[in-house]
Image (cartoon, helix red, strand yellow):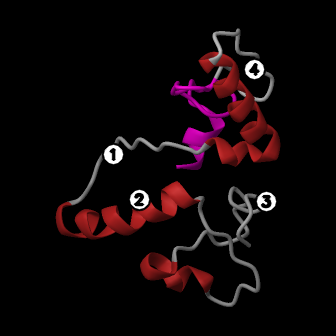
Amino acid sequence: DNSSAFRMNEAVPLVVPEINIEAVKDSRLIANPNCTTAIGAMALYPLHQAFGLKKVIMSSYQAASGAGAEGMEELQAGCRDMLDGKAVDNKVFAHPLPFNVIPHIDVFLDNGYTKEEMKV
């Protein structure tokens, strides 16, 4: 399954084939981590094997298109408004996005991390 539906389900193996294919066993359903995690794991696993890793700090930069057509429309309209000297309205994103970087994605959880951070 390539969605997030089973990622946190302990009964469904979370698999990056190049790293832990053996986790599949006889399971008829497997989950895979989100794209940031899968790519990071591919780079970090050999380092972990060679040296052991205790902590990793990762940054990822997500495209506005991840919010779908509504997010893209808001970005496009906001850019146009900003360049025309008008106020930028935001409904899809937590803050105005044009010419900006938003320091978090999704909502904050009780542990202080966002849902997106917990995926990693």
Label 3 SS: loop
Crowdedness of circle 1 by 10 Å Cα count: few (<14), some, many (20+)? few
Residue that mark 4 sits on: 90
Crowdedness of circle 3 by 10 Å Cα count: few (<14), some, many (20+)? few
Q: Nearer the viewer, mark 1 or mark 4?
A: 4
Q: Amino acid at mark 2?
A: Gly
> What's the mark number on residue 56?
1
Q: Amino acid at mark 1?
A: Val
Q: Nearer the viewer, mark 4 or mark 2?
A: 4
Q: Amino acid at mark 3?
A: Ala
Magenta part of the chain: 97-120
- N-term mark: 2 or 3: 3
Residue occupying image coordinates x 57% and y 24%:
112
Q: Are marks 1 and 3 in contact (CB under 8 Å)?
A: no
Q: Are marks 2 and 1 in contact (CB under 8 Å)?
A: yes
Which residue is more in the foreground, 90 or 60?
90
Q: Residue 106 in the image: x percent, y percent? A: 68, 33
Q: Residue 31 in the image: x percent, y percent? A: 68, 70
